[in-house]
Amino acid sequence: MFLPAFPTFKCDNMICGGDFNFVFNLDLDKEGGARRTNFNARKDCFTLMEKYDLIDIWRDRNPFTWHSNISEIHCRLDSFIVSRHLSFKVKDAFFQPTFHTDHCMVVL
């Protein structure tokens, strides 16, 4: 999914954020519903993160999961992955409710 788009990509500073539409960790990032995610996209993302030394900054700063009262199924789909060496420059990473969506916005 991601990897063919970056065959010779070179950059020291990367920040990638948005709705990844998969969970990184089924135990920490998903509650309720079927125990599944888009495993192919997740695998590609982990490969990309390893290749470019990226981290999930929200998970790095928040080793716990979250809770929502909106529905019975909770999935952390929105995230930022950043270059590991930039992590000290990130002051905070947190969720914030938004309007007209079932997602919470990740603020970096």
Image: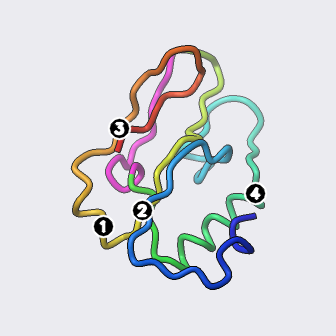
Q: In terms of secondary structure, what is the magenta stretch mainly?
A: loop
Q: Amino acid at mark 4?
A: Phe
Q: Are marks 3 and 1 in contact (CB under 8 Å)?
A: no
Mark in the foreground, 2 or 4? 2
Q: Secondary structure at mark 2?
A: strand
Mark in the foreground, 3 or 1? 1
Q: Residue 86 or 77: which is nearer the viewer?
A: 86
The answer to whether residue 103 is magenta is no
Region rendered in magenta: 58-69
Mark in the foreground, 4 or 3? 3
Q: Residue 12 or 24: which is nearer the viewer?
A: 12
Quarter of the image holding residue 30? top right
Mark in the foreground, 1 or 4? 1
Residue topped by disc 3: 94
Image spot of residue 21 (x, y percent): 67, 43
Q: Secondary structure at mark 3?
A: strand
